[in-house]
Amino acid sequence: MDNFTEEQLLERAVELIQAKLPAGWTAGLQTHSFNGATDTLLEILGPQSSGAAVLVEVRKSIAPRDIEALLGASLFKRLRAQVQRPIMVVAPYLSPRSRELLIEEDVGYLDMTGNLRLSLPYPVLYLEVQGADTDPNPEKRRKRGLRGAQVGNLVRALVDVSPPYGVTALARKAKVDPGYATRILETLEAEALIQRADRGKIVDIRWVELLQQRAAALDLLAPHKMKMFISQRGPAEARKAIAGEEKVVVTGSFVAADLAPVAAPALLVICTLLDAQGLAGRLKLLPTSAGGDVAIVRPENYGAFFNSRFDKSGVNVAAPSQVAIDCLSGNGRMPSEGKAVLEWMQQDQETWRAHSLEEVSWPEWIPQ
């Protein structure tokens, strides 16, 4: 639907909805005037001639930050004031993040790839169809995702420290180039994951969604960066054996269980830039290709150590934000553990989130 007019988008929307309606239902368009403004309505008629009118907002292109602006705009306030009519956004393509924002506000949607959600209280109707999760006609400019070590550093700093703060200070704390940080922040702003004020200062962060999207771009236990072992005395004893070690950090299930227990942890995840085989030898671990209880993961850079701390047993453990990312990007029951960690983090941010960039730190052994 690249370069289609608004009228063509509306006509195609009616065709797509009609194809998904039950037998005896019909869809059509009409206009409605209210306080001097003319709105487009999608009229849905049920089999007993009972009908409902849905206010339609059609856009030739729309990004998540446009959705946030739209939801807070006077337009939507006016639309909602009209007899509490259902509202639907129609566009050539709606990203997963855009759809998520619309669902949060109970706004329907339809795009030309087949993504559809429409809920009517009367006559009772609910349609939900999955279309494409990638734009079939993306902009020429390459979109930056949330993969990569430097992106991870920025995400961790954004989550671990409450705003406001500027780009330069954030980049310095995250150990990334300010120009690179600016480009990543533009992507995050377009995805409505952060909000910036004048001169680029970060003033708000949707940190739960940011952690979820970062985790979705990763695979903690990818074979190319992980080696699996069996602990002869069990993973809990292996954890005790690394007490006092600076250059290893424990993450995943064992730390999640300390924060928000779901079940007894079964897999000990150790991140280190040290030689995995050498560390395994010191811990008396046996290599295995399957069924291990200790995973030694080589992180992309030093980011896993950002804001880590030594627990009461003397073991270096990852910050809650890192634990959430690692669990959500793990396998088995780890995503459930990650969800529990996120819920714990939401309950009391004062227990883990700093108020300024000066309050978080890197271990002294990491190069400046």
Image: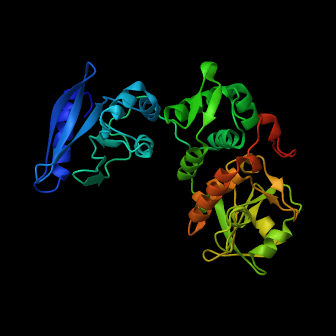
- Image quarter where the C terminus lies is top right
Q: Quarter of the image holding residue 248?
A: bottom right
Q: Quarter of the image holding residue 90?
A: top left
Residue at 64% over, 26% down = 179
The percent position of residue 41, horizontal first and vertical second, equals 22, 34
Observer-nearest of 172 and 347: 347
What colour scheme was applied to this rendering of the protein?
A: rainbow
Callout count: 0
Res. 284 in view: no
Please, which residue is most extreme toward the bottom here? Answer: 232
Q: Quarter of the image holding residue 326?
A: bottom right
Residue at 57% over, 64% down = 336
104 relative to 346 in the view: left or right = left
The percent position of residue 146, horizontal first and vertical second, equals 56, 43
Residue at 80% over, 65% down = 279
Observer-nearest of 317 and 10: 10
Observer-nearest of 3 and 48: 48
Res. 169 in view: yes
Task: Look at the picture and state if 169 lies above or below 209.
Answer: above
The percent position of residue 95, horizontal first and vertical second, equals 40, 41
The percent position of residue 172, horizontal first and vertical second, equals 75, 31
Residue at 71% over, 53% down = 320
128 relative to 292 in the view: left or right = left
293 relative to 97 in the view: left or right = right
- Image quarter where the N terminus lies is top left
Observer-nearest of 219 and 236: 236
